[in-house]
Amino acid sequence: MIRYAIRRIPSALLVLFLASIAVFALIHLAKGDPAALAAGPDASPAEIAAKRHQLGLDDSLASQYLNWLRGELTGDLGNAYISGGSIGELVRNGLGNTVELTSGAVVLALALGGAAGMGMGVSRRRPVNAVLNALTTLAFAVPTYVSGVLLVLVLAVIFPILPAGGHESLLRDPTIGVQYLIMPALCLSLPAAATIARFLATSMRQVLDEDFLATGVAKGLKTRRLLFRHALPNALPPVLTIVGIQIGQMLGGAIVVEAIFAWPGVGQLLRDSVLDHEYLIVQDLLLFAVAVFIVLQMITDLVHAYIDPRIRTEH
Amino acid sequence: MATLNVAAPMPVTPRQHRIRWLFGSPIATAGIAVVVTLFAAGLFAPLLAPFPPNGQTNAALQGASTTHLLGTDEFGRDVLSRILYGIRQDAIVAVVSVPAGALLGVSLGLLTGLAGWLDTILQRIFDVMLAFTALIAGVTVASIVGPGLPAVLVTVAVVNVPLFGRITRTSVLTLRNRDYVVAARVVGVRPIRLLVRHVLPNGVDPLIVQLALSLSLAVFIEGAMSFISLGVLLPQPSLGNMLQKSINYLDRNPWYAIGPMVVVTLLVVGFQLIADGLTHRLLRR
Amino acid sequence: MSDLYSANLSRRRFLAGSLGVGGAVLLASCTAAVSRDKSGRSKPVQGGTLRMVQTADIAPATLLSQNNPNFSICRTVFNTLTEYDHKTLDPKPSLATHWNISDGGKTYVLSLRDDVKYHTGRPFGPDDVVNVIDILKQDTTSSQLKHVAAICDARKTGANEVTLTFSQAVSNVFDLFEVMIVVDKETYPDLLAGRKFIGTGPFTMQSYRPGSGYTLKRNDQYWKAGRPYLDGVEVAVVTQSSSAVSSLRSGQSQLALDLAPLDAIGLKGSAGFQLVPSDAQDSVFYLGQNVTVPPLDKVEVRQAIAQAIDRERILSQVLGGIGHTSSIPWSPSSSAFDVSKRDTYRHDPAKAKQLLATAGASGASVDIYYNAGFAPNAGIAEIVQFDLTSAGLKATAKPQQAADFFSLLSGSGIPGLFVNVHGFGQLHPATLVKGAFPFNARANAERFTSQQYSDLATKMWTTTDQTAAKGVYADMNDLLIKEQFVTDLVVSSHTYTISTKLNGLAWNMFDYINLDDAYLST
């Protein structure tokens, strides 16, 4: 198993390295001049040129790439062009908030997806299945920007019980913080919940059809015990693999969800940085998003290989 | 959204009649009805729209009425008319970008069958491309070409390349050892002709399912990018940018939001239903 | 100028307007302390933390460039040399206690306070003033008052005295003293990088969290005895105006800066809140017309455009009715303000069409550029496009990203019309025509050059006699109204949306907020 893991690492690193070159090269194709923005509203061309030099924007591309990579590896991400503030800190602040949002969404996705999946997998009643099926189809397909606006319309405008948007740290004020978290986390969790539900349902149905459960029933085990102690543990592994992929997708989803709910996370930071030509921040965050995806994919592969040993020998 | 990983490669059998399947599945038929109706409405927007999409008046943020079925926006423009014109943006993306991305993806996928080293390189390229999930790809493209409809067009095309590429590659791998392909090769059919004339036609079913999924994804991406100001820019109406603006006015004219919400959902779900129906008919026996 | 076109503009960054309907009543009372305690208790309360939201993050690198988001720290962490009285517009002492003007207005001898310490404990002195002036002269610093600093030679002439010698007498030196924050010379590089914020103001920066906000703590060493009342200030950056409203409603914060006009108006009706437009009225929305681009090279076309725009609709649909439609750039507080010329251009499509026809420009194409990230400008651009189309021009909207817009503006120039905001119309008229980029007589955003104009601008700057100046102002107004390279639309202003619990909020004439006397009643 460990050997398999070690074998997977170089190719993941290679993809990551290629992605870093792609990100850097692509971003430098972009037009637009961050120096103009950094120099302030009324800067003269001379002031802008001075700023460009000060920001190192007139260095050669190769040296800009190496500087960037070095910064990336040493954790010194440099300073933002416009605000002059530390990018590391900007990213850390945003990341903290995004992790808060994503964690909330993962918890909700597991809870909702788990409940719906169990319901669909176990229930033999047609109406229940049909309703759950329709709900998961909708939750899967409806874009976050639709479900998000709908949530705001219903829970903040028609029945004003939750704030329309904004953020309060859970650590600083848990009661208020949770109120801010509910809608964005729910919105972000819906597609993942639907996917988890479908996988779990399929997996449960397969497990329930297997012999050892029939034996369980014969031995007279209680249904609930049967489900949770015997069926669920066997149905879970394939579902776990999909959870990893779903978390990887959430980072992309967070860009939209954070925009709807004014959540000050990396998604907002990325969007604003693109609009402001803050190449350094855009590069960092894109590479980060790609890295997260690659790492989660690798973990998923490993979990998969752990569950299904045949995979290990295939490659 | 999770559509990216939906089209996992699946084993296929070649089929002969591909017209009947479209209407053979009630789910797919429903999806087609919805999508065709909406796109037709967008196409005939100049005839159907009660007002010009950019016609401003003093009557801002009116609620729904018989004159303005979905009310007006912050500049007194008719929301319904703007939605009809907004659908056109999705239609453009669907008609231009999805086929372009699919074509490129299929071509690259076929190339993997030519040589081992080519396969390795293309596989890595697909890996890197897939590591950019749909919206991350959108942000990347927008930061290069700048926000606007072109950014959406490029994003949708780029996102589709590895999806179609991988499916095609799987078909190539499974089909190239089939008897008739081997036979053709022995007879001396040249490799490219072999791939295009013998392998591709028999691996087309999963590509068609992916096409439906990709159209759904295209509508999603247009909406999402426009919603975060990286896609279609105002005053040009699009479903995404209307929805974004409408958040500020939910209490004054909720129809401003509800209209685009319903249309986007119908389009996304409609294409998804087509894909579901096709999956049942084509890929499962 | 563009306090408003803050450096990193995001999607929903708005500003709000000025004197609205009913705002006039507030204006009279808001010079010093805006919100009186309703119960009649006016005894300040010591302690408490003010929680405040603003829609954009501060940008330390542009602290000397009149950048709107920074206005919450310019006068809370730092101080300026003098402060205008809002009614009489006379400068009042702050870090400078006395000033002696001699040599026909060329020499200013400033006596400085001797009891002021920077937050590091280092005493403030004349060298610090010399240092800021030097910084303003540098190429990497941009400031609208740079033209004043540029001709100034600053020297320490005593333990608490600094002498500024100008190469010629100019009328707007106190605008410089009002705007220029006196930074600490030892930590200036750290300030630019957002690492250390060392000033002499009533609060010290306890922590700055880029992108999300900052925390201020009471400066126990503050030179104004017994001030400030507050123990601290918590500032959160909430990029979405509607979310800032939620924050106010839930009681999470007591002050919001520059809410979206329509959101601010929405809150106006609710009990416990007050919408206060700044009396400085220094947010003027305008349409720039590049006079080198046909058909805008014809003055009749520019006038037709000025005539075609429905300013009333801009005021109500974009700015929530806060402000005044205007054809001249001045705030009512300016000595160049002339109420009889304010409404020279009114919405008159027929006349606009006729003017265009005479100029032979009917059906000509014009492009309208704007920063799409700044919602009011985007909204105004949409209205302008519609109005110009209705007047028979082929008007195309060209939405830009902030960075592209500003690099076009200050670089190769904008090839057509553009929507933007300017400030600096509230005090000395000279500051506008010398320092604000749309007007700058030496080189402006519209590429407008005229000997008459630059002569008038120089005359405005160097005429220190008030009565003589009046005539110059009248000539300048006539020229601006005729030439229309800048088409002014609405004179609006920054807004403060405050909970009635907050008392004693003040600001200077450039809208730096001042919390010296602010307190929270229970």
Image: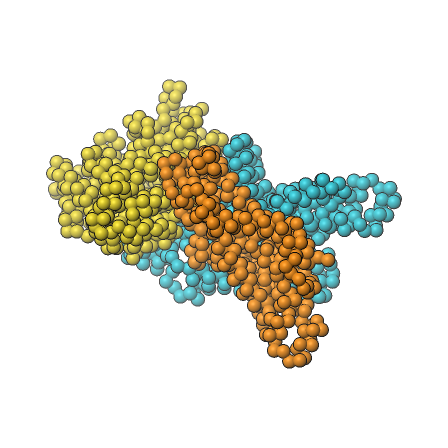
User: Where is A258 relative to C320, above or below?
Assistant: below
Asked where in the image residue C68 lies, by quadrant, the reply is top left
Which is more toward the observer, C348 or C340? C348
Which is more toward the observer, A228 or B231? B231
Q: Is residue C289 left or right of residue A124?
A: left
User: Where is A77 relative to A105, above or below?
Assistant: below
Q: Is residue C493 visible?
A: no
* Place of residue A178 in the rendered image (x, y in percent of width and height, measured from the top left): 57, 37
User: Where is C249 relative to B196, above or below?
Assistant: above
Residue at figure coordinates x 62%, y 50% from the top left = B29
* Place of residue C246 in the rendered image (x, y in percent of width and height, measured from the top left): 48, 34
Q: Is residue B177 left or right of residue B107?
A: right
Residue at figure coordinates x 59%, y 74% from the top left = B192
Q: Colour of chain C?
A: yellow
* Place of residue A16 in the rendered image (x, y in percent of width and height, measured from the top left): 55, 62
Q: How is the image coloured?
A: by chain
Asked where in the image residue A45 lies, by quadrant, the reply is bottom left
Q: Is residue A49 visible?
A: yes
Quadrant into which the N terminus of chain A falls? bottom right
Asked where in the image residue C78 lies, by quadrant, the reply is top left
Q: Colour of chain B?
A: orange
Residue at figure coordinates x 61%, y 44% from the top left = A139
* Place of residue A233 in the rendered image (x, y in percent of width and height, measured from the top left): 75, 48
Q: What residue occupies the far top of the structure in this picture?
A: C40
Q: Is residue B128 left or right of residue A229?
A: left
Which is more toward the observer, A284 or B76? B76
Q: In the image, which lettered chain appears cyan?
A: A
Residue at figure coordinates x 33%, y 29% from the top left = C21
Counting the numbered discs, the total is 0
Which is more toward the observer, C107 or C267? C267
Q: What residue occupies the far right of the structure in this picture?
A: A219
